[in-house]
Image (spheres, rainbow, N blue to C red):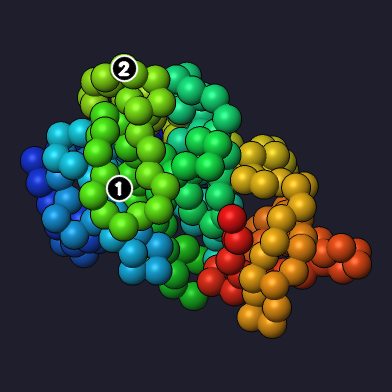
């Protein structure tokens, strides 16, 4: 087992990603080390967003990885593997799980988990990656202005043991990470694309030029969203270049 081979628990932290980064600066850290906490005072999401999490209610963790086999231009494959591991874990408890590009895990139209992956690149190699994960397990009230949070407890009515769920999550992530290091990229791409939120469904999108009707057909290795428009043309988008319109 790689992911979860070492677990570091701290009762509270500003950010598990920041703490993991400080560990890497100070000492040698085994690959797959998981830093987890019961509360983050400054939890971070993609693009500087904050991550709301009530104390002792949810999974909050960061995983230290050394995916040197991945070319930096294909680094989104790491996000694919992590996203799929989270989906595999949640599949044990609920259904209708999808991946909302680029980094959110949804149940139907609500967000149950988020991912923040930070890569350190040296030359043409990824020196290390820190995969931050937040999964809503037992929280039943959300007070931030996030539009659509949901927890596993809200979906099922059950209460979940954080340590048991952490072990299950690490196992699921470990399986997907081993697919990554064995270079089974086609499997990861196919599984990831099949999980995409609104895959092949016509919806309105807003890009930098217009509001248009399109459908998601795939995400590339480097993380670009491919959207087919009604006229048959296909547009590629980076993060923040296109918005979903509900």
The disc at residue 100 is none
Q: Which residue is rendered at x = 10% and y = 46% of the image?
A: 12
Determine if residue 4 is in view.
no
**Quadrant assignment, res 51:** bottom left
Q: Residue at x 33, y 64 (%)?
A: 49
- The residue drawn where x is 77% and y is 47% is 200
- Of residues 77 and 95, which is closer to you in this image? 95
- The quadrant of the rendering that contains the C terminus is bottom right
Left or right of 10: which side holds 136?
A: right
Q: Is residue 212 above or below residue 152?
A: below
Q: Which residue is mark 2?
A: 158
Q: Quadrant of residue 32?
A: top left
Calculate the distance from the C-alpha at mark 2 to the C-alpha at mark 1. 25 Å
Decide: is 86 above or below 208: above
How crowded pointer 2 is (Cα within 10 Å; few <14, some 14-19, many 20+) is rated as few
Residue furthest to the front? 246
Secondary structure under the numbered disc 1 in the rendered image: strand
Q: Residue at x 13, y 52 (%)?
A: 13
Q: Of label 2 and label 1, which has the lower sequence position?
A: 1
Question: In the image, residue 24 lies at what x, y percent?
Answer: 24, 59
x and y percent of residue 231 in the render? Answer: 91, 67
Q: Nearer the viewer, mark 2 or mark 1?
A: 2
Measuring from the top left, give residue 109's x and y in whole percent: 53, 42
Check disc 2 and report its element: helix, strand or loop.
loop
Q: Is residue 210 above or below residue 11?
A: below
Residue indicated by mark 1: 62
Left or right of residue 65, residue 109 in this image: right
Q: Nearer the viewer, residue 29 or 39?
A: 39
Question: Where is residue 104 shown, x and y percent of the image?
Answer: 48, 49
């Amino acid at each position: 087992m790689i992911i979860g081979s070492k677990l570091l628990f701290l009762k509270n932290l500003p950010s598990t990603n920041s703490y993991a980064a400080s560990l890497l600066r100070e000492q040698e850290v085994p690959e797959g080390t998981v830093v987890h906490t019961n509360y983050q005072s400054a939890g971070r999401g993609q693009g500087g967003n904050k991550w709301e999490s009530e104390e002792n209610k949810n999974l909050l963790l960061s995983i230290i990885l050394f995916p040197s086999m991945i070319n930096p231009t294909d680094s989104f494959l790491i996000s694919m593997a992590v996203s799929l591991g989270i989906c595999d874990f949640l599949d044990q408890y609920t259904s209708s799980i999808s991946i909302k590009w680029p980094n959110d895990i949804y149940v139907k139209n609500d967000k149950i988990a988020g991912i923040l992956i930070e890569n350190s690149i040296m030359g043409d190699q990824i020196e290390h990656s820190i995969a931050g994960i937040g999964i809503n397990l037992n929280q039943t009230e959300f007070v931030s202005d996030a539009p659509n949070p949901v927890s596993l407890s809200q979906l099922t009515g059950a209460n979940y043991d954080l340590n048991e769920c952490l072990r299950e999550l690490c196992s699921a992530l470990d399986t997907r990470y081993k697919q990554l290091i064995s270079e089974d990229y086609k499997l990861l791409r196919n599984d990831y694309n099949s999980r995409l939120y609104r895959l092949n469904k016509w919806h309105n999108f807003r890009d930098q030029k217009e509001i248009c009707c399109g459908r998601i057909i795939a995400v590339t290795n480097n993380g670009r969203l491919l959207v087919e428009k009604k006229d048959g043309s296909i547009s590629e988008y980076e993060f923040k270049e296109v918005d979903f319109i509900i």
